[in-house]
Image: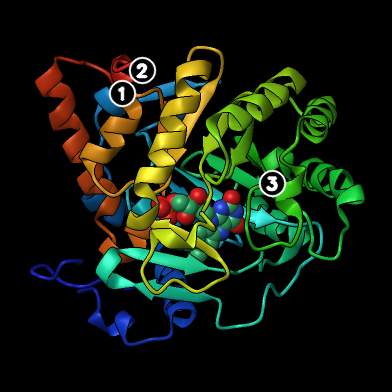
Amino acid sequence: MVMWMGKGNKHSLISRMFFTLEPETAHEMAIKGMNLARVSRVSSLMGLSYRIRSPSLQQTIHGIRFENPVGLACFDKNARFIDGAYALGFGFTEIGGVTPLAQPGNPKPRLFRFPKHSSLQNALGFANDGMEVITGRLEDNHPARLPIGINIAKNKVTPNEDAKSDYLKVIKHIHGYADYLTINVSSPNTLGIRELQNETFLKDVFKSARQITTLPLFLKISPDMTPEYAIEICDAAIKGGASGIVATNTSIDYSLLPNAKNFGGISGQALKFKSAKLFKAIAKELYGRTTLISVGGVDSGQEAYYRIRHGASLVELITAFIYNGPSTAKRINKDLLKLMKNDGYRNISEAVGSAL
Ligand SMILES: Cc1cc2nc3c(=O)[nH]c(=O)nc-3n(C[C@H](O)[C@H](O)[C@H](O)COP(=O)(O)O)c2cc1C
């Protein structure tokens, strides 16, 4: 899936080479290549080149120290890219979705590039190694060099009536190796999972999760709902004990992207406006009451700054990284510093919510 290209192209060369590969093969190669970064001296050297170290970008949120506000959103399904995310300058990485049992995901092909629109469509369906193997890898990497979020999901074979038990199993198993957890009920690629975006389920699952862990718990929502409904379900999650909201996942609004397939979720530039619009609407109501993370089409310092000024304490991205390559987080962080300076902010936390 990776397509890092050289300067002078719309996107960026580690490889036009990657672009010639089938998207998932390219993704796998990138992760294997970056496993070099697991040799900690290599990751430290790369970190010197890609990590922007500035006190102005640092924040402590729910007791977690974030060196910068730019996170990697579920690129790393199986906890094999932790040092890679650090080496490439991200402030944190969200790993997953992790399910109780390993599962192969949906049949291939299930990942499609739309380079003209800097967008992707994916129908992976939580292809992952399962909580036991992933927890083992997290243990080997513990303590990690950057904050780790774990995106929690349910197995495809688990009916919605038993979904709560899947979420709680993963939380129990993995929480010792995470800095925060995200309950994901918003993937478009697991049949029926979005039906769990309802007040009763969310209040209940967060209440039960709260009995297991004191870690910050986030809810990740879909962009395909009205702001009113989104606020209702976010409220229910907060009442149940959620610490924050991650908005948004990919979209099934296929009118967003010319020649879109009629399955899977759209991400990247085609999602940007829709995701930002819902984010702003929920932030109006929820900013100050809970912690907000904005994701969906974030591809520049300007866009990250916009989300931050509208209430996001942190942002995440995946599609922009896939198109623009290793220096994505560095570029965004550098530009954030410039934008903050122009506005007279000494720390990124001063910019959070400043447009509301
Ligand atoms: C290949 C791929 C796999 C994804 N897997 C997950 C996942 O397992 N869990 C999840 O909550 N979101 C997942 N997402 C959604 C992203 O985390 C993010 O919410 C969405 O892509 C919008 O951000 P972007 O425009 O920066 O890509 C995935 C996205 C892509 C492109």
**Helix, strand or loop at mark 3:** loop
Where is residue 343 drawn, in percent x and y?
14, 18
Above or below, comparing residue 281 to residue 303 in the picture: above
Res. 42 visible in picture: no
Q: Residue at x 82, y 25 (%)?
A: 207
**Residue 251 located left or right of residue 41:** right
Residue that label 3 marks: 185
Q: CA distance from mark 3 to mark 2?
A: 26 Å
Where is residue 188 drawn, in percent x and y?
62, 58
Q: Crowdedness of circle 2 by 10 Å Cα count: few (<14), some, many (20+)?
A: many
Residue that label 1 marks: 309
Q: Residue at x 65, y 38 (%)?
A: 181
**Residue 128 located left or right of residue 4:** right
Residue that label 2 marks: 353
Q: Crowdedness of circle 3 by 10 Å Cα count: few (<14), some, many (20+)?
A: many
Disc 1 or 2, which lies upstream in sequence?
Answer: 1
Q: Amino acid at mark 3?
A: Val
**Residue 344 located left or right of residue 68:** left
Where is residue 281 drawn, in percent x and y?
45, 27
Above or below, comparing residue 204 to residue 133 in the picture: above
